[in-house]
Image (tube, rainbow, N blue to C red):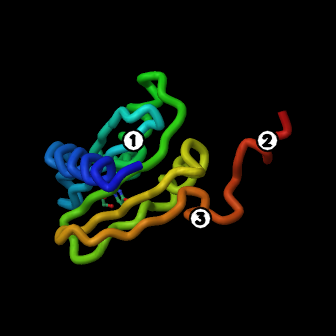
Amino acid sequence: MTDADIDKLIAAAWKARENAYCRYSGFAVGAAVLTEAGTIYSGCNVENASYGLTICAERVSLFQAIAHGERRFSAIAVVTDTESPTPPCGACRQVIHELMPAGRVFCVDGSGRRTEFAGQDLLPGAFSAENLDL
Ligand code: THU
């Protein structure tokens, strides 16, 4: 993954953020996920009057990619117009752990400052497929 790939991914996340449906919190979030083959899928947060039904931008972008048949991801970017980068919530960490444990996670704030996590470090001791006695 080149620096240009990462910049492109972050740009896609900013573009998706423009569509955030966040009438309750006013907190707009954009995300974009990069597949190993180089395709980008993006998403924004989508809120609901029944607040608990809200879904974060990270999961929208990942589920969008999955619904298009993608299974292998190398990175996800999350962008917010804030003073420091916004980290993924617990639910998104669980989903990232499931779908892209080896991926890179970039969180970007309003001035372009970035923090990076490894997907597998976001949720130590995560519940996973191995815990299902199938
Ligand atoms: N949100 C995200 O979309 N991603 C995050 O990483 C943090 C939180 C959304 C959920 C909700 O619509 C709003 O931000 C406030 O929590």
In the image, farthest residue toward the bottom: 83
At x 42%, y 23%, the residue is 68
Mark 1 to mark 2 CA distance (whole Å): 28 Å
SS for callout 3: helix
Q: Amino acid at mark 2?
A: Leu
At x 38%, y 70%, the residue is 115
Mark positioned earlier in the residue sequence (3 or 1): 1
| Front position in the image: 75 or 83 | 75
Residue 52 locus on image (x, y percent): 40, 51
> Is ligand 1 less than 8 Å from the beta carbon at label 1?
no
Q: Nearer the viewer, mark 2 or mark 3?
A: 3
Residue 59 quadrant: top left
Quadrant containing the C terminus is top right
Q: Decide: few, some or many residues near mark 3? Use Cα within 10 Å; few <14, some 14-19, many ≥20.
A: few
From the viewer's perspective, tell me whether residue 127 is left or right of residue 106: right
The residue that mark 1 highlights is: 34
At x 22%, y 61%, the residue is 27
Task: Give the label on residue 121, or none.
Answer: 3
Q: Decide: few, some or many residues near mark 1? Use Cα within 10 Å; few <14, some 14-19, many ≥20.
A: many
The residue that mark 2 highlights is: 132
From the viewer's perspective, tell me whether residue 99 is left or right of residue 114: right
